Amino acid sequence: MVRMTGLAPLAILCGLGLGLGLWLLVSLAPRLSRPSLATRVAPYVLDVSSDARDLRDRETADPLPVFGAMLEPVTARVRRAVTSLVGGNELVAIRLRQAGIPMAVEEFRSRQLIWAAAAAAIAVVASLAFGSIQSVPVAAPIALVLVAAVGGFLARDYLLQRAARARVQRMTKELPTVLEFLTLSLSAGESILDALRRIGRISRGELAAELSTVSRDVSTGLPLADSLERLSSQLRMPPLTRAVEQITGALERGTPLAEVLRAQAQDARENAKRELLEISGKKEVAMLIPLVFLILPVTIAIAIFPGLFVLQLGFG
């Protein structure tokens, strides 16, 4: 049985706060907080390196400047063990790319471990606080800590899936408008590369930002068809993949791109309509749940129970 005095949880929280404060103070030391070599070189190679641009545009910093370096051997082994158990590094890389998060798979695994450790720490504090009030079996806090750690680990993966799905949906909705704009630009006499540059310059959507990276890659010497195929393979969007296949095929055969893009925009519109009809059908079925399990039983109760009450009074 685990039982602690009433001041033990408060002492634990004070100790955690003191340790976190000392950790933040140590992380501000110049020797430990100095930028890495990649961060110092990145501003000078922005025109030729997409990784340097991603590093330059990154707004968040590494949350573990001190302990990350001290515990790197241990965390590397834990990451390898987690990867061998759950697998899916390629899938995680695809989701990170779809979500637009400039993060390596190893860093994401480290953050998953941080989430699991934070959830386990919260579970430990909750167990100690509850144990100071009432005696509980030893197995209950242990089970709570394990469940919290697994839940924190899976919660980070779920949030990544949700972010990737939401961004892919936004880009799918933007695809017909982008294709129509490309068609208009090509009909006006611009080349496909100039049209892509114009979209990246005047648009503010997710897909426009991705197409602007294509134009930058072409400026560095990468062929347009290869850049578009790499973008479609990274994002894994079926409508975009079909559009890229048609564009690359038209470039190889010399087919007019305006007609091809107009047909692809129409197909994207029809696909959006079909998805909207499917979503409306699912929502229609979901709307029946409160009707059948909430409104109908309440209506029946209101209709039957007054009559039963009157009958009981009459028989009485």
Image (spheres, rainbow, N blue to C red):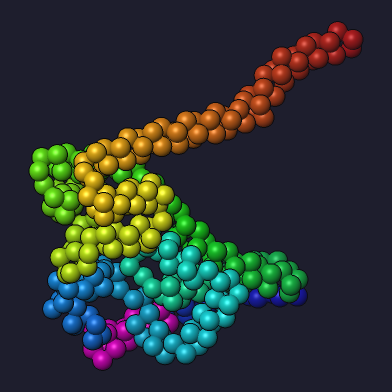
Closer to the camera, 237 or 229? 229
Please name the predominant secondary structure of the magenta segment in the image. Answer: helix
Above or below, 74 against 260 in this view is below
Rendered location of residue 271, percent (x, y): 41, 37
**Residue name at image x 53 percent, y 69 percent:** 88
Closer to the camera, 259 or 103? 259
Tell me the quarter of the picture where residue 96 sits: bottom left
Horizontally, is 90 left or right of 211 in the view? right
Above or below, 232 against 53 in this view is above
Tell me the quarter of the picture where residue 310 sits: top right
Horizontally, is 99 left or right of 55 in the view? right
**Residue name at image x 10 percent, y 40 percent:** 188
Closer to the camera, 211 or 303? 211
Question: What span is colored magenta in the figure?
Answer: 19-35
**Residue name at image x 14 percent, y 71 percent:** 47
Tell me the quarter of the picture where residue 8 sits: bottom right
Rendered location of residue 147, percent (x, y): 64, 66
